[in-house]
Amino acid sequence: MRSNAIEFQQEFLRKLDPPGMPPHDLRLEKGAIVMLLCNLDVSAGLCNGTRPIVENFGRHTLGCRFACGERRGRYVLLPLIDNYTDKGLSFRCKRTQFPVRLAFSLSINKAQGQSFDRVPAIFSLVGERDHGRGLSNPSHFTRLAYFSVL
């Protein structure tokens, strides 16, 4: 029987960071905020972009609490899943991992539709055309008293 398998050095495979796939080396501790990278259960709120807080570690599960929204404080278990990709690669790659990434910050696209009590923001305005583009609508803050520009 012929095999189409190709052997790669483990070090090479560990360094791969294809889009949509969790990083090979994921170091978490209790209290870390993570972001889901796929839809696990939409009806339970486990959607791409959801940000739970890590509370417990199991061999095959990650115990987390929802950080915000109507499910705030609810405890959920995130399972290990098989991730497959061939984007940007000449072969198909499989990793069995938790479908999360550390979420120290959010892009504007990921933050859309969410409300925050406090938001630390860094603005980098360069050039004449950038004047006034820093923030389009401060009404997205739940309390304007928490909004300030340094």
Image: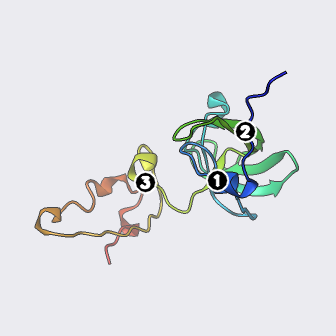
Q: Which residue is mark 1?
A: 23
Decide if residue 59 is in sight here: yes
Given residues 24 and 141, the one toward you in this image is 24
Contact (Cβ within 8 Å) of mark 2 with mark 1: no
Q: CA distance from mark 2 to mark 1?
A: 22 Å
Q: Which residue is mark 3?
A: 107
Q: Tag 2: residue type?
A: Ile
Q: Earlier in the sequence, mark 2 or mark 1?
A: 2
Q: Is residue 1 left or right of residue 41?
A: right
Residue 112, percent from left and from top: 41, 45
Residue 55, percent from left and from top: 77, 57
Q: Classify residue 40 by image quadrant.
A: top right
Residue 94, percent from left and from top: 71, 38
Task: Classify 10 Å Cα crowding around label 3: few (below 14), some (14-19), many (20 and above).
Answer: few
Q: Across the whole image, how many numbered discs are drawn on residues?
A: 3
Q: CA distance from mark 2 to mark 3?
A: 37 Å
Q: Looking at the image, is 74 positioned above or below residue 38?
A: below
Q: Earlier in the sequence, mark 2 or mark 3?
A: 2
Instruction: Specify the label residue 6 is tagged with.
Output: 2
Q: CA distance from mark 1 to mark 3?
A: 18 Å
